[in-house]
Amino acid sequence: RGRGSKPARLEMKPDRAAPSHSRKGGSKPLECQSAIAAIPSPPAGRRANRKKNPYYLCDTRDCPSHRKSIPRAEIEGAFEEIVQSLQPTTKLFALAKIMFRDAWRQRAAQAQEQLLSCKRELKVIEGQIENLLERIVEASNPAVIKAYEARIEKLEHERLLADEKASPPPCRRAGSRSLSNSR
């Protein structure tokens, strides 16, 4: 019987590859630099007792590696060696330290500005409470006094929240250092 142009098994199509392949579409053969497909196991053909191991293959027609299977362990082992051999330079560490210190200082400045804003809000609320207390003393209508008292109660709640925001953060752990002082 003649062979058709269609693959013998559905797994041969790259879009039906098993999701267990971590490098699916990320690896490229050296010859053509196009993405390779992850396939669950090599086509068994007539031999059903073949060991099923995941592998990758290139599906580009002009590639010298076209339809040649590469075991997953081989590609992922090489990839793991490359990742483990990567080491940042001292310049990169220095640059990262400077960037982190700048970000830390910027965040500290933002926190300081928030603290000052909360303190200003606290003073405004306290002024409003004082103003309402003076109005209560001058008021003679019980309904107006009750409305002022309700407003004072609401402002007291807001004052407690603003006071909590304006209070200093909890102490740091004993062994921690400030990044702004370290060099």
Image (spheres, rainbow, N blue to C red):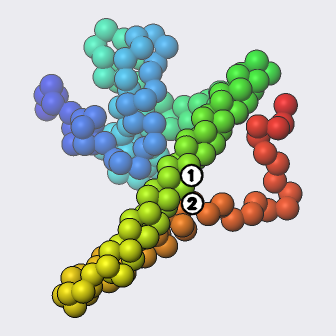
Residue 164, how many percent across, how many down? Answer: 55, 68
Q: In the image, is 30 to the left or to the right of 154? A: right
Residue at image coords 39%, 77%: 133
- Amino acid of disc 2: Ala
Mark 2: secondary structure: helix
Residue at image coords 21%, 82%: 144
- Amino acid of disc 1: Leu
Provide the residue designation for mark 2.
Answer: 166
Residue 125, how many percent across, how many down? Answer: 43, 64
Q: Can residue 158 be seen by looking at this rendering?
A: no
Provide the residue designation for mark 1.
Answer: 115
**Which of the marked residues, 1 or 2, is nearer the chain's N terminus?**
1
Residue 166, how many percent across, how many down? Answer: 57, 60
Q: Nearer the viewer, residue 85 or 112?
A: 112
Q: Can residue 105 be seen by looking at this rendering?
A: yes
Q: Looking at the picture, does residue 128 appear above or below residue 49?
A: below
Mark 1 surroundings: few (<14), some (14-19) or many (≥20) residues within 10 A = some
Q: Nearer the viewer, residue 121 or 105?
A: 121
Q: Residue furthest bottom?
A: 142
Mark 2 surroundings: few (<14), some (14-19) or many (≥20) residues within 10 A = some
Q: Quadrant of the N terminus?
A: top left
The reply to whether the C-beta atoms of the residues labelled 1 and 2 are less than 8 Å apart is: yes
Residue 181, disc? none
